[in-house]
Image (cartoon, rainbow, N blue to C red):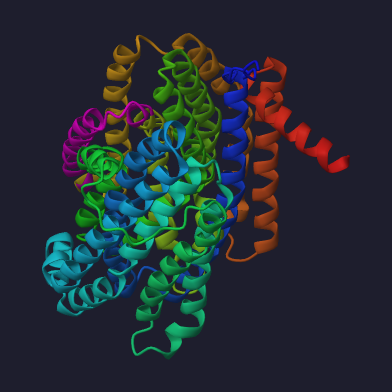
Amino acid sequence: MSEPTVSPTVPPTSQDENRAVIKSAGIIGVATFSSRILGFVRDMVLAKLFGATPAADAFFVAYRIPNLLRELFAEGSMSAAFIPVFTEYHTLKSKQDAWELASATFTTLLTIVTGITLIGILGSAGIVWLLAPGFHDDPIRLEMTTLLTRIMFPYLIFISLAALAMGVLNSLRAFAAPAFSPVFFNLFIIGCSLFLAPAMPEPILGVAIGVVAGGAAQFAMQLPGLKRRGMLFGLTFNPGHPGVRKIGRLMIPSLLGLSVTQINITVSTILGSFFAGGPTYLFYGMRLIQFPLGIFGVALVTAILPTLSAQAARGALDELRTTLGFGLRMILFIMVPAMLGLMFLRVPIVHLVFEHGTFTAHDTAETAFAVLCYSVGLWAFGGVRIIVSAFYSLKDTTTPAISAAVAVGANILFSLMLMSSLGAAGLALATALAAMVNGGILVVILNRRLGGVEWSTVGRSAVRVLVASVPIVLACGWVASAQIWTHSDEWVGKCTMLLVGIGLSVAGYLGVHALFRSEELGVLWGMVSRKLGRVMG
């Protein structure tokens, strides 16, 4: 009897890969948009209740500590090291092998972050003393920051496990549940701020409890997705597992590599503690920057890393170069107009979102100045994430770590140079400049490593983006110069004018791209058309 004929697997084309990346990024973007909107509601609640008071400064400094560790041990290095290895196991080995790797990683990670959390709780006083030198002359604020740090440290455990669950689901091309999980994080903080905080002797303590509860919810909501795919973690303490050791080797240098932005923000928080309201202005300023970065930049990076890892595992470097070039073009397509919009509309946006309750006009001006300085580097923040993902897909975590170390040094140097003349906003500008330094180093090295990327295509895309941005400058400049922003009321008129300005900017930007028939717009429009066709059909 003849052997059955097996059809060879046809590798996906670059267009198929690009469409898959954009589709995944779209799902993540919609989910992240929902989370960011709730994040804005959360920030509006916190700004109204606490403004830029000493309690707010204490909270944002305390929150920065577990948040930095989250980037280092969870969403940064863990995700970047885990996804390529898990993708390799899932692609080249059995499902059982992949589950055993996930379970061994889960147990090892749980053990490590629990130990770090206990050490952090016991050593909170010393940690706060080092990270908030500007609080040394204010014992009450120093004590409050220490207490808040102790309360929020367990957040590291839950968010680390949530990041691992996200890594497994994203590797399996399941993006919805991980992307929507931060919605629950924001809901818990909002709920605790409104209902628990007023019952506490110090209201800000209720917000800290909400952070921990939100982190637990963010992990819990991903468990059903893991169970459906047969990947629900088991307790398997096996740190000697070959895959776990491989993740560890990749993770150690990447502790600095992918988290350079967070480290630079932490440096800014430390130095910002010398300015009254500085930590608060920098936090809210970065929150506005993270809106487009989280919705589009992080969504694209999250979607593209499994694709790059699969291409690297197959040795398909030509495909990897094409996917990388497409990712960089999409970053420019989104981040440049977002950068210009934030630069011109910084005062209207901060005024509408935050200037309520105890958040004053002076706080608006200082926060808007920080937004302006952060915005300069928005394209670099997004671009670095794409380029670092390419290194990690090649299982090279050392090069990004070295580049990041240089960038951290540059950030400290820029901060010391600029903070005396620009205040807290100078620290924001230093962070942006450091991201540009990091991106420049990585581009040069990656170009040599891959034998070139499609730079001519990227360059043409950049020119189209700049030309298409002219309507944004005109529309946003018109809105920002209106006299209505000097009035203390007329909130409906202000909201209407801001929305009209954004609408005109988006329409003009996309219109110019349509005239150019740009591929980036074509890919997006094709996906929207197919989605609408399925809905109408």
Quadrant position of the N terminus in the picture: top right
**Residue 509 percent location from the top left of the image:** 65, 29
Residue situated furthest right in the rendering: 537
Rendered view: 171 above or below 448: below
**Residue 115 percent location from the top left of the image:** 19, 65
**Residue 362 percent location from the top left of the image:** 40, 61
115 or 132: nearer the viewer: 115
352 or 396: nearer the viewer: 396
Q: Is residue 424 visible?
A: no
Residue drawn at point x = 33 percent, y = 26 percent? 394
Residue drawn at point x = 58 percent, y = 38 percent? 24
Rendered view: 37 above or below 153: above
Q: Is residue 91 visible?
A: yes
366 or 394: nearer the viewer: 394
Rendered view: 99 above or below 173: below
Q: Which residues are magenta?
A: 390-419
Horizontal side, residue 132 vs residue 343: left or right: left
Horizontal side, residue 284 vs residue 222: left or right: left
Reply yes or no: does residue 407 show up in magenta: yes
Horizontal side, residue 511 vs residue 118: left or right: right
Horizontal side, residue 511 vs residue 306: left or right: right
**Residue 407 percent location from the top left of the image:** 22, 34
Reply yes or no: does residue 472 show up in magenta: no
Residue drawn at point x = 45 percent, y = 28 percent? 310
Quadrant position of the C terminus in the picture: top right
User: Main SS of the magenta segment?
Assistant: helix
